[in-house]
Amino acid sequence: MSENAAVPVRLRAEVLAAPAYRQGAAPTKPGFKLSSNENPFAPLPGVLDALRRRLDVNRYAGAAMPELRAELAAPFGVGPERVHLGAGSVTILYQLVHAAAGAGDEYLFAWPSFEAYPSLGLASGATPVPVPLAAGARHDLDAMADAITERTRAILLCTPNNPTGPAIARADFDRFMARVPATVLVVLDEAYREFVTDPAAVRGEDVLAAHPNLVVLRTFSKAYGLAGLRIGYGVGEPAILAAAQSIAIPLSVTGIAEAAARASLEPAARGELEARVAVIVERRDALVAGLRELGLAIPEAQGNFVWIPEGEGGVADAQTLAAAFAGAGTLVRPFAGHGVRISVGEAESLPEVLDIVRRFLG
Ligand SMILES: Cc1ncc(COP(=O)(O)O)c(C=O)c1O
């Protein structure tokens, strides 16, 4: 629908004023799609077979999915009552912000970060409060703690940070949490957790027990390569998850997503997952090294993407670089005024990315 189309019924002005989430574009000519942090590999072994066996799509899935929740709870050392499933972790972000923050309330996040964050509270009327990243494109946790007011109801921490790459260090997380009131919800968004190689990075499993106000978010969309099936989960206090469930659209997690997730957790699939994650990490690190050799100040990359900043140490204009990529048939994600995010994709995309950037820098 065009943005200017006449609206025949009375809708909320703040909703009409809001831009919709913009998905990474698909290539229009042969090239690589490196704009959505997707996984270049096919689903893990056993997943397609599991989907073929789950043929009862004329039925609603049993929403409780106790076996899957128990499997996901185990690494956290908790029971299934502490796991909440959603049709993608972004739906749980939405539910949590809505459960915590209404009109007149605020929710905090670093910026730039996951592009969905600013609009999550839109329908609830909550005010998004972006806090600029610090040097090295890292979370400025001191500034975020300083930004907490009596109206703050939720804080979203993205680690590693999409789109810039650094992970939050455990020690910094601990210091930050000591400054957050126990009544404020903190969401640790670990969508890219599996790609983290920094041993000093915070891990949801290690910190959940100490913080009843913390919910850890994970997804099957990235390392597991199930973005199109839409399944993610949150781990935390049952009372907080029950509130998220109250906001959830009923029956939105499908049976085929459940079957794919469970097949992805089988031992053979887990072994292959580790091998694939290692390949993506190797490509990521090679991309970072290659871009640094071209003289760019690339921040630490802990996800399945790398960040070329705009300005000092980076390129003069993010949009122009993204246009140069598009002209060559490869799509990346520009963040106007901030930088360009390039997802780690197929092996053949690496020399292509480096060539495009080399030519761009002249
Ligand atoms: C930081 C972060 N969180 C959450 C999501 C949502 O992932 P999904 O809804 O596919 O689980 C994304 C997707 O790109 C992301 O980058």
Image (tube, grey):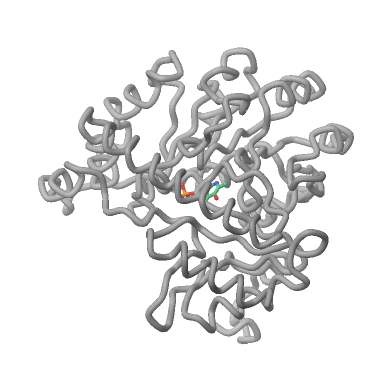
Whether residue 207 is situated above or below residue 231 in the rendered picture = above
Confirm whether residue 317 shows in the render: yes
Confirm whether residue 150 shows in the render: no
Q: Position of residue 248 (x, y in %)?
A: 48, 44
**As drawn, is 8 to the left or to the right of 224?**
right
**As drawn, is 337 to the left or to the right of 261?**
right
Please give the name of the residue rendered at 19% of the width and 43% of the height, measured from the top-left corner.
45
- Quadrant of image for the C terminus: bottom right
Q: Nearer the viewer, residue 174 or 294?
A: 294
Whether residue 114 is situated above or below residue 193 in the rendered picture = below
Q: Position of residue 340 (x, y in %)?
A: 65, 64
**As drawn, is 251 to the left or to the right of 292?**
left
Q: Nearer the viewer, residue 334 or 94?
A: 334
Q: Position of residue 165 (x, y in %)?
A: 62, 46
Please give the name of the residue rendered at 20% of the width and 44% of the height, measured from the top-left corner.
47
Q: Nearer the viewer, residue 102 or 320?
A: 320
Q: Position of residue 166 (x, y in %)?
A: 65, 41
Quadrant of res 62: top left
